[in-house]
Amino acid sequence: MNLDHFLTAVTPFNLCLALFGVAAGTIVGSIPGLTATMALAVLVPITFSMDPASALILLGAIYTGALYGGAYAAILLNTPGTPSAIATTFDGYPMAKRGDGDLAVALACFASVCGGLIGAFALLLLAPPLSKVALAFGPVEYFWLSVFGLSLIASLSTGNLMKGLAGGAFGMILSTVGVAEISADIRLTFGSQTLISGFGVVGTLIGLYCIPVLIDLVAVPDRHLKVEKDVKSVRIGEAFGLAMRSKFNLIRSSIIGTLVGILPGAGGSVAGLVAYSEVKRGAKPHQKFGEGEPDGIMAVESANNATVGGGFIPTLVLGIPGTPPDAIVLGALLVQGVRTGPTMFQQSGSIVYTFIYGLIIATIMMLPAGLLIGRYAYKSIVTIPKAVLVPAVGFMTIIGTFAIRNSISDVVIMLCLGVFGWVVARFGFAASPIVLGLILGPIAEQGFVQGWTIGAATNNLTGMFFGRPISQGIIAFTLITLVLPVFMARRRAKATEGATE
Amino acid sequence: MLRRTILKVGAAMALVTSLATVASAELSGPVNYVIPFGPGGESDISARMQQPFFKEKFGQDLVVSYQPGGGGAVGWASLNGLSSDGQTIMGVNLPHIVIKPAQKDVGFKTEDLNIFHMFHFTPDAIVVTADSPYQTLEDLVADAKANPGQVTISGSGKASANHLAQIKFDKMTGAMTTYVPFKGTGAAVTALLGKQVKAEWGYTTVGAAQGDAVRMLAVAMEERHPLFPDVPTFKELGYDMVGGAYRGIALPNTASDETTKMWSDMISAVNADEAFRQKMLDAGFALLDVDAAGMDAFMAERKEEYLKDAREAGLIK
């Protein structure tokens, strides 16, 4: 970690790669179905003909850009471009609907850069000690973490708790369809070959979020998003002011994102949700989360970009990839002959540090590139007539779903889920709890089975599930999340009662 | 006499032309190399290892894509419906392709797969952390015998290579360990390093990736792995265990014999490259050279052994 590595990282060639990578990643990430994993997998062979550090900078830049790009579709179309952007839809789409889409996109950009930088600096300065977090999390901790994540449904669906929980339960049932990840049992397929592959997260995401939006676009005559008469070309200054006022929120969310990113298997979607529920918990009276609150977007976008740096901590220090894109970078390193693992920072230090500096540079590049692309994306989505927008987006959802694993049955499942999602939305069931259940269900199930197996073998089931300090901490958080909304609602009810008397 | 000579020459010429057509089966562009798992696993990494050598020898890119689902079943069930022009190939894994169809109808049968090369395997190994009280394999076996069921061992998946190895080893030693299945080798190793379990049923690749952080107690090879000259084989310690997870590549079964032969020869050529072999060994893999001609015999032998083990373990009926 010295100036040499920094200078290696800032050669003109590497700077160009970082800029190109961020721009390409942003575009890929903004299209639902096209993921960072896919883009990286195709580009890895380039690393063979390039100097390893440059190639890694390119890969890291694409990954960072893709996580930010996921926010565009979330804000402008109510469809998360990547699972990490699920919680971005909560406030992003309402903002866009009332004509503040450009502001929301700019906010997402500032937040992503902030989160990306904090995550990358954690990787640069604190990687070895922070990697211990990954090891401290055993099966039971993952079980409780996902229970905590599911309890967020309660906090996300105030006033609609039962419907939220029903949606979450439905998502968990969907997650059990197909071949079980660890027991290899085939469940709930009713003899169908199509269902063996189960419900993929990305396909379900596209179906449940995007299709209802498309149906609504066709069903109502209004414009897609409200456009203010005097379209201000950029609202960067306003966004920057808002971001500066929410410094505390940004930093806290970035730290949450970094820590959740370190846990292999948790990922950006969980990080975004935890950060969102934290900022919502501390809401001031004038803030209306879920109706277009800028702080909501900033919390989610800073947290999910912080998982990039966080995720590389176990990848580089322990040789254990946190997310699928991390796994691809790890594979590229192995082919280069770079030994990951405990000794890597000493033995292959120059490549690693050049890569980390490259990641930081790419994150900074995201500021101009992201604002520019964001403005363009906003303008085109707003000005394109509906008759073009709907078929274009519809076409992209089908291509995107098909591209996940070249499967036409995935597309059929996606479309069916979409219509289903539209119908149940009429009855007040939102898409987010279902997708949350689908993502968290398998984590909870695996953690429970593994924890139970180990606990039963050592004759210490109670101690296994309730006696470990980290578990106890997560259980406490879960209880707070579950009880607080009920308590608050009751107090509010009492207050209004008092007022009417 | 003359006529016979002419016939012979004619036959020879026919043979030469047919050989020439064999040689003329060739690639027309980048190859789609489907891995029926997610990225980062042993299947992905070994495919990545092949990429640069293949490009160098045959001038075409191997483009790796992932088609995960059903523990590989989704990919294999779709393989024979893909184009058979030789531009699409798919990774196959043992014991998965034997055990899965034997358990339930998963949309493909082992015999349906047109496997043209098995190029490596990852030998089974018992891995413990560097500071584990188990210095030798005997320490672990003794503990497992003294405290039946209390020795917890993580591994990747159920009815998998790791799980079969655990069942087989328990039977051999008479000890009783508890197998804890995880989603992939990465998660199983995390559980080991975090001391959630006492040992891991993994592969030699785990020893290579984790270096000084772990200790392998024994490896399931005929001879010691060149990367780990100090780690004994199970055989040396008196347990007849050789095996692991085998990986190869298949074409759709509608591919012509020429295409199959071409691919078998190409992957054999990559496997024969000394630099490739060294890279694979350095990452902890063990090489295997079963080409299309030897595949039937190899598969028959593996299949018999896996089915016997799985049946005894109660994994299949």
Image (tube, coloured by chain):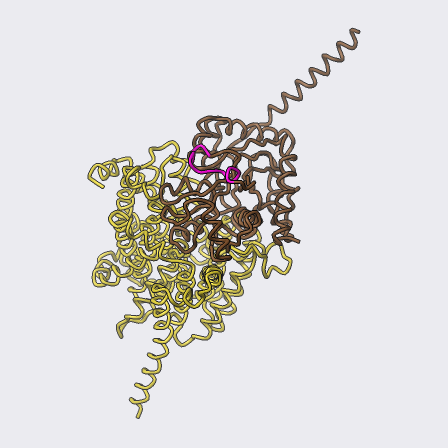
Chain colours: A yellow, B brown
Relative to B296, say whether A254 is above or below. below
Query: Is any atom of residue A264 visible in this view?
Result: yes
Where residue A345 sits: x, y (%)? 29, 41
The answer to if A181 sits in the magenta stretch is: no
Closest to the observer, A236 or A8: A8
Q: What is the residue that sits farthest to the bottom in this orientation?
A: A501
Query: Which of the 4 image quadrants contains residue A342?
Result: top left
Query: Is any atom of residue A210 visible in this view?
Result: no
Query: Which of the 4 image quadrants contains residue A14?
Result: top left
Closest to the observer, A292 or B82: B82
The answer to if B226 sits in the magenta stretch is: yes
Q: For the stretch drawn in magenta, what is the main secondary structure?
A: loop
Quadrant containing the N terminus of chain B in the rendered view: top right
Q: Residue at x 46, y 73 (%)?
A: A163
Quadrant containing the C terminus of chain B in the rendered view: bottom right
Relative to B304, say whether A452 is above or below. below
Where residue B70 sits: x, y (%)? 55, 52
Q: Is A5 positioned to the left or the right of A77 in the image?
A: left
Where residue A246 sits: x, y (%)? 23, 63
Label tally: 0
Relative to B269, say whether B129 is above or below. below
Q: Is A130 positioned to the left or the right of B114 in the image?
A: left
Where residue B268 sits: x, y (%)? 54, 28
Q: Is A438 positioned to the left or the right of A408 in the image?
A: left
Q: Residue at x 49, y 68 (%)?
A: A169
Closest to the observer, A169 or A18: A169
Q: From which residue to which does the magenta span run?
A: B225-237
